[in-house]
Structure formats: structure tokens, C-alpha cells
Amino acid sequence: MNRVIAFAVLSFMALAVARAAGDHQSWPFEAPFGSFDATTLQQGLVVYQADCAECHGLRLIRYRDLRGIGLSHSEIVALTSKIKRMVGKKEMAVTPDDRMRALDSHGSSVAAPDLSLTVAARRGGPEALYSLLTGYREAPPDAAIIPGYYYNVAYPGGQIAMAPALKKGSVTFADGVKPDVGEMAHDVTVFLAWSADPTLNERKLVGLTAMIYLVVFWLVGLIALRPGRGR
């Protein structure tokens, strides 16, 4: 019991230190008139495909929906032509109309969660997911880590069954940049935020347009009804 309490205290202290370090990210799309950046979304897709897609699917998203992050139809066709999905021991081709399910259905007794809504469902939103992806540390010497689990300062209890997902050097972006884990975590978090709300840009544009119209009509009405007009 004492070891459990000590481990909980150490986990809390590590989390407090991590938060105090100020490693908080900017999420422009959360602003009232903010939007998703196409370049960041496409880089996030690259990270997702390289380090997440084998185990975690996006069942609410079809490959054709990737037009929403700025990919053309031909780019989506080129992307899916390179993807093969394993179902048991059978290899299946992927088409633009298919849902973005996990690529390797390896029959594990514990299915990896679908990530379609993970940012929207997670308390703390994108910051919480970013903290989780970058929260892996070496466990304190006296920590009682469950076999097969990993120490993560952002996860409740400090132990998580998922191995560190992001691997430095696993991707190269279109501009030739090889991102570090922090950059990969940021971009894939933005991509997963989009998967949870793929119509955000369009909704905010409609809302902004409606507000502009309302302001214009208000000004016209104010001028038309001002005292003394027409005398």
C-alpha cells in the first residue's frame, strides 16, 4: 500500500512539474473565428498514417473525406493505392470510399480505441491528447510499474498500456522537415481534432458571414429609422 501511495504522489509531482514547465500548445481552431490549417492537417495525416493507423482507426471518416484537409481526388487515390488493410491473415485493398479503419486487425484481446472523436470526447480536448502523447518518461526507480505498462505523467495513475506511439524519425514532411516528437504530437492532434469536427471551417465561415449580414442590416435599419429622417 505504501508503494502505491508513493507512486501516486510521484506521478502527481511529475505531472505538476510538466505543467509548470509551460509546455502548452496553441490551438488556433479553438478561437471563435479560428480554423484548421491545411498544411498542419496534412502533416498530421502523415504522422497518423505512420505511427497510429496500424492499430487505431477513424471509422467516422472515409478516405474521400480527406478533401476536407486540402487533398485532391487524385492525391487521395494515390494515397489509398499504397494502403493494404489486414483482416486476420487476409490482405485487402483500400479505396477512397472505404472508412479509415485500423490497418491491422490482428485479433488482440484488447481492441485499440477508435480515434474519430477522441479529441472531442477527451477532457481537456487537444491539450490533453498532446500531453498524453508527449508524457512518456522513465519511471522513478521505486515506482511499481505493472508489467507491459509504461510510465506517462499525463495519464491518470501514471501507467498506460499503450507504448509510446510517436517515433522520432518515422516521418518526413513534404517540405523535407523531420519533426521531433513534440511537433509530431501537435500536428497529429490537430488532425484528430479535425476528424472529430470536419465541418468546423465551413460552420465558422457561415457564422461569420451571417454576423456580417446582421451588422450590415442593423446599420441600414439604424440609418433608416434615425430621428428626423424624411422631414
Image (cartoon, rainbow, N blue to C red):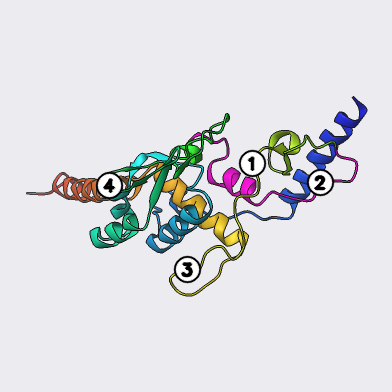
Left or right: 4 as drawn, with respect to 135: right
Q: Nearer the viewer, mark 1 or mark 2?
A: 1
**Do we see residue 231 in this rendering?**
no
Query: Whole-percent x and y of residue 13?
Result: 82, 43
* Picture quadrant where residue 168 is located: bottom right
Q: Residue 29: horizontal and vertical position, in percent?
A: 44, 51
Q: Which residue is drawn at 50% across and 53% down?
A: 188
Give the farthest residue toward the top: 1
Q: In this orientation, which residue lies closer to the viewer: 34 or 184?
A: 184
**Residue 139, numbered label:** 2
Secondary structure of the residue carrying numbered label 1: loop
- Mark in front: 2 vs 4: 2
C-beta proximity under 8 Å, tags 2 and 4: no
Which x, y percent locates residue 60?
Answer: 36, 37
Cβ–Cβ under 8 Å for marks 1 and 3: no
Sequence-earlier tag: 2 or 3: 2
Give the labeled residue for mark 4. 211
Disc 1 or 3, which lies upstream in sequence? 1
Q: Which residue lies furthest to the front in this view?
A: 89
The residue that mark 3 highlights is: 173
Badge 1 is on which residue?
Answer: 162
Say what secondary structure mark 3 lies in.
loop
Q: How far apart are marks 2 and 4 (CA)?
A: 52 Å
- At mark 2, the secondary structure is loop
Alpha carbons under labels 1 and 4: distance apart: 45 Å
The three-letter code of the residue at mark 2 reads Ala
> Within 10 angstroms of label 2, few (less than 14), some, or many (20 or more) residues?
some
Camera-near label (1 vs 4) is 1
**Which segment is the magenta one?**
121-143
Amino acid type for the residue under numbered disc 3: Phe
